[in-house]
Image: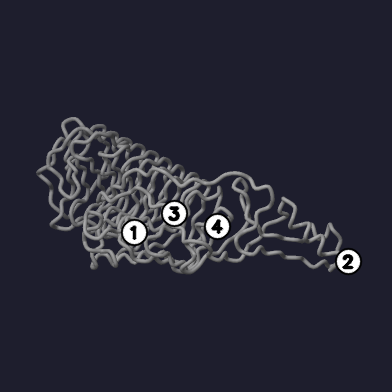
Amino acid sequence: MSKITPLFTLLLSISAVVQAVPAPAPQASGPEHHGHHGHHGGHGHGSWPPYSSRPGVPGGKPSSVPLPSATPTVSLLRSTSSAEPNAATFAASAIITASPDASDASNASCTFSGSNGAASASKSKKSCSTIVLSDVAVPSGTTLDLTDLEDGTAVIFEGTTSFGYEEWEGPLVSVSGTGIKVSGASGHVIDGDGSRWWDGKGSNGGTTKPKFFYAHDLTSSTITGLNLKNSPVQVFSVDGSTDLTLDSITIDDSDGDSQGGHNTDAFDVGESTGIIISGATVYNQDDCLAINSGKNITFTGGSCSGGHGLSIGSVGGRDDNTVSDVTISNSKISNSQNGVRIKTVYDATGSVSGVTYKDITLSNITKYGIVIEQDYENGSPTGKPTTGVPITDLTLDGITGDVASDATNIYILCGDGSCSDWTWNEVSVTGGSTSDECKNIPSGASC
């Protein structure tokens, strides 16, 4: 060992890490880190106001190799030769796990678990290229803060992620960064245990309820295969994101049907570009999809049950009130209040253009199969359409299915001249009544 020790000491002192390998789970140290709470107060049905700032990240490059808060792992690989190892052998075989500086990505895989897992993950996130969250119990009033991750970081949820109870606005989880890959391991669940907050009022009053999952300021990123259960109120807020794909996500808030779940929107999208939501399975009590602003947005291959349908809007009354180039396709809506839905806010301004609904199947819709209205106010439409948010270049192609006998097949309420250039093809909604209250129906559509 007399020859080994100096060489090993030399390896620890040099500023270049030979190779990083998975480290043991960091232990919690220092005060608990509370996540950034965001600025999304509840405005009812699918309306979260725009997101603003993010916590800063300290810069600067250390003068020497910084070690992680946990004890570094040093693995010495045994030489197959009988000869005494030389310096070259140790240079190649000493594997040191160390956290990088702010400008370098780490190769470390870090696992966090238990009641200290959220604080430890938030503290150490810059040092991990892969973050594994295994049975993390997030303390009450705390965000699982995965914002400002290093580029290319992978986040994996394992086991059950749970949250303590507190009346606050949330979010329970927040993720941001570039090239981020969020996924769920087999059998995992992110359980909001929303019944502790549910009171039938959602974000319109009563108990203050935390939003579930902020997918804000994500660029060229993916969220894949997550299972989320019993959100206290709105589930995904997609805001300020670009080129984000959410694929094969299951949201099960079905317990809220009998326990007072309300405003449990599955996907609220605002101020975002290039969003793809594919293969979603949703059981909830509000919009399956609500696009409040943004462009180049696709929702496809979804199954929505129990909620308020696939919606554009409500549009109007925010900082950004423009929706354009949206395709909603190959999806099923069942046991819901509405099927296809576009709602613009009464006496507001903005625009909805280039929206296509294609190959949408409806079953057991209890209120409206297709509803397009320019008189929307939260919970109480006025019945008097306004023209400030025109709906143009709208295509409905292959919208078929049935509604309940006491429901309305199609309802269109447009302002004078504010709905135009609509194309309807193979639209057949049956089973309910025909509305005699439609107004200003554009050419090509029918009520």
Question: Which residue was labeled with disc 1?
Answer: 282
Determine whether the residue tagged by mark 3 lies in a helix, strand or loop.
strand
Q: Residue 210 carries which label?
A: none
Classify mark 2: residues with Cα within 10 Å, few (<14), some (14-19) or many (20+): few
Dot 1 amino acid type? Val
Residue designated by label 2: 84
Q: Which amino acid does label 4 sit on?
A: Ser
| Image x and y of residue 369, in percent | 21, 51
Q: Nearer the viewer, residue 327 or 277?
A: 277
Q: How far is mark 4 from mark 1, CA to CA?
A: 33 Å
Q: In which quarter of the image is residue 8?
A: bottom right
Q: In this view, does 1 lie to the left or right of 355?
A: right
Is the Cβ of the residue at disc 4 closer than 8 Å to that at disc 3?
Answer: no
Q: Reading the chain from its start, which is encountered first: label 2 or label 4?
A: 2
Q: Which of marks 3 and 1 is nearer the N terminus?
A: 3
Q: What kind of element bears circle 2?
A: loop
**Which quarter of the rendering shows the N terminus?**
bottom right
Q: Earlier in the sequence, mark 4 or mark 3?
A: 4
Q: Please tell me which residue is depicted at 17% across the width and 55% down the height of the picture.
A: 431
Give the residue type that dot 2 points to.
Answer: Glu
Q: Residue 269's spot in the image, x, y percent? A: 35, 46
